[in-house]
Image (cartoon, grey):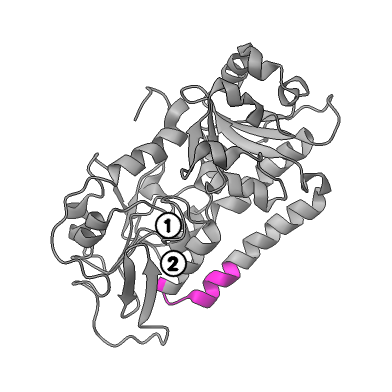
Amino acid sequence: MPGSSRGARLVAALASALLLFSTAAACGSDDDSDAAGSDTSASENSAFPVTLAHKYGSTTVKSEPKRIVTVGLTDQDAVLALGKVPVGTTEWLGGYKGAIGPWATDKLGSGKVPTVLKDTGTGPQTEKIAALRPDLILAVYGGLTKDQYTTLSKFAPVVAQPKQYNDFGVPWQQQTEIIGKALGQESEAKDLVKGVESDFATAAEDNPKFAGASAVMATPYEGTFVFGSQDSRSRVLTDLGFKLPTDLDKVIGDKFGANISKERTDLLDTDAIVWIVADRAKDEAKLHKNALYADLDVAKQGREVLVEEAGDYGNSVSFVSVLSLPYMLERLVPQLAAAVDGDTATKVTEPAS
């Protein structure tokens, strides 16, 4: 991961993940359906067997899974929200026991804290995953390669990322519903999604100035890195009613985000901009030393929301799951409201907690 501090974590974590998931050695069968290690006994849950389509074909889960490993970087939250505790999770942001954020810890209950898996530079830790004796491996918010999928499928049925989205690009709604279906709780998952979508709708209704206003999320990583329309952070803005800069995806291409050139600093001149930073005061000062940026109305009029990436709030902004979103909305929405209220005297303040 480039950089020595958490200043590059949010971008580098995903960028590294794209690399980490790209080189695991392949072995075993290329079968895209049932995998060795799945439970072939009749399930007491009438939802099974269930078949899920994904980037590498389809996978059938024959019976209710009991030992779930999440390879997807945020998949554990949907599992927890549906009343199950994974035996293994994959660390992304770090700092949380079991890779479970504070917005999800109450869902752990009396369950055993999951074993945390870490990417070593060659993709998922297949031996450690196998040692957990999984009967389901979830890689929905991820970027498994075909070879990695085949390797993991030797141990249990694997639900890979859906093919209709970029790697690490599945919306939280689809992520929750896919995982719900895999767990035999499709209806419950849809209800969870409706609940959080209701939170978004309420926030948008309470803040009519969000509708049609332009906004973008960015971080000062190796210059200026902006998140595109297929990134979960950007979808938070659009789900609240904001629109993204017109040329954003044209500049980024088919990635979740990219660094922009100085010539495209105009993409930042929106009605509100959310900066994910390592240090609020220091990074704000650095941003405003850039004459091209400082001359934009968004900077001159104080329409900036600076979120420190370290800490629970900053982590929730990037996690974007069915459990982290309500926690995040309570803090981000008032900041966005202050940014677009039309009064340059209004200060965008940090959340109380």
Residue at 65% over, 12% down: 291
The image quarter in which residue 265 lies: top right
The location of residue 316, given as percent across then percent down, is 54, 44
Compared with 32, 164 (above or below) is above
The answer to whether residue 59 is left or right of residue 304 is: left
Please give the residue where the numbered disc 2 appears in the rendered image.
179
Dominant secondary-structure state across the stretch colored magenta:
helix
Compared with 340, 239 (above or below) is below
Residue 112: mark: none
Please give the residue where the numbered disc 1 appears in the rendered image.
75
Q: Earlier in the sequence, mark 1 or mark 2?
A: 1
* Residue type, mark 2 in image: Ile
| Magenta span | 182-192
- SS class, disc 2: helix
Mark 1 Cα-neighbour bin, 10 Å: few <14, some 14–19, many ≥20:
many
Q: Residue furthest left?
A: 28
Q: CA distance from mark 1 to mark 2?
A: 8 Å
Specify the quadrant that holds the C terminus: top right
Residue at 25% over, 46% down: 123
User: Between residues 169 and 204, which one lies in front from this camera angle?
Assistant: 169
The answer to whether residue 179 is left or right of residue 312 is: left
The image quarter in which residue 39 lies: bottom left
The location of residue 151, given as percent across then percent down, is 19, 59
User: Between residues 18 and 317, which one lies in front from this camera angle?
Assistant: 18
The answer to whether residue 52 is left or right of residue 258 is: left
